[in-house]
Image (cartoon, grey):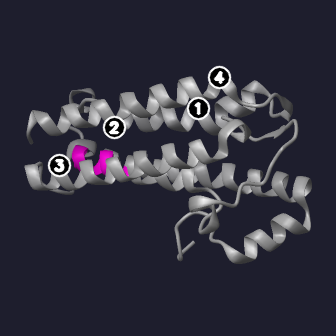
Amino acid sequence: MSEYIKTGLKIIWMIVGLFWLVSGLITKKAKAQETFPKRFIYYWLPLIVAFYLLGPGDWFGKSWLREKFVEHTNLVGTIGLLFCIAGAVIAIWSRYLLGRNWSLSVQRKSEHELIQKGIYKTIRHPIYFGLLLFIIGNGIIVGDYRAIIAVIVVFISLWFKLIKEERLLIEIFGDQYLNYKLKTKALIPFVL
């Protein structure tokens, strides 16, 4: 697989990471949030595991985790990179639309607002959708079975976070959020 694909993947990770870091500095203050151990176990630990699984193949020696589920060709790498780009654009755009309402963990914000514009007209958690596309694209580029495990770990982690967020948003917005749920999908447009 071409080094351009691997370099492109690194650049996309840097852009998303930098945007998240900078935009996280202007969020509203949290009125309530989960404890640090809960946040670490539910959100950070699964991501650390996924990043480890998507890391250099040498870490896994000659284990079954290194077996390919797709060929490591430029075509496959380009398809994976396109998934990554689409996921990054969706995640960044969604994060931008949330503005100061965004939070890294499930939290009640001061003057919490329910955003229903842009992609939020179609799905309630587009950042998670974008991140999933991004991880799937990264997994396609890696092409080994370890990448499938990484995608599953991230999906499960995001799904549990999504459920917690939905409960909190119903608590905050009541019928307004319940009506919003009737008109949208949770994670994947028109599907789930």
Q: Which residue is mark 2?
A: 54
Position of residue 152 measured from the top left corner of the image (x, y, whole percent): 46, 53
145 is higher (above) or lower (below) than 116 = above
Q: Residues within 10 Å of mark 1 (few under 14, many from 20)?
A: some
Q: Residue at 41% of width from left, 45% of height from top?
A: 88
Q: Residue at 17% of width from left, 51% of height from top?
A: 78
* Marker disc for residue 44: 1
Q: Amino acid at mark 3?
A: Gly
Please give the range of residues in magenta. Answer: 136-145
- Tell me which corner region of the image, top left, top right, bottom left or bottom right, holds residue 52: top left
- Name which of mark 4 and mark 1 comes first in the sequence: 4
Position of residue 89 measured from the top left corner of the image (x, y, whole percent): 42, 48
Mark 2 vs mark 4: in front: 4
Position of residue 87 measured from the top left corner of the image (x, y, whole percent): 41, 51
CB-based contact (under 8 Å), mark 4 and mark 3:
no
9 is higher (above) or lower (below) than 72 = above
Q: Amino acid at mark 4?
A: Leu
Give the prevailing secondary structure in the magenta stretch.
helix
Mark 4 vs mark 3: in front: 4
- The secondary structure type at the circle numbered 1 is helix
Q: Is residue 26 visible?
A: yes
Q: How far is disc 4 from disc 3 in space, using C-alphas?
A: 34 Å
- Tell me which corner region of the image, top left, top right, bottom left or bottom right, holds residue 63: top left
Q: Which residue is mark 3?
A: 77
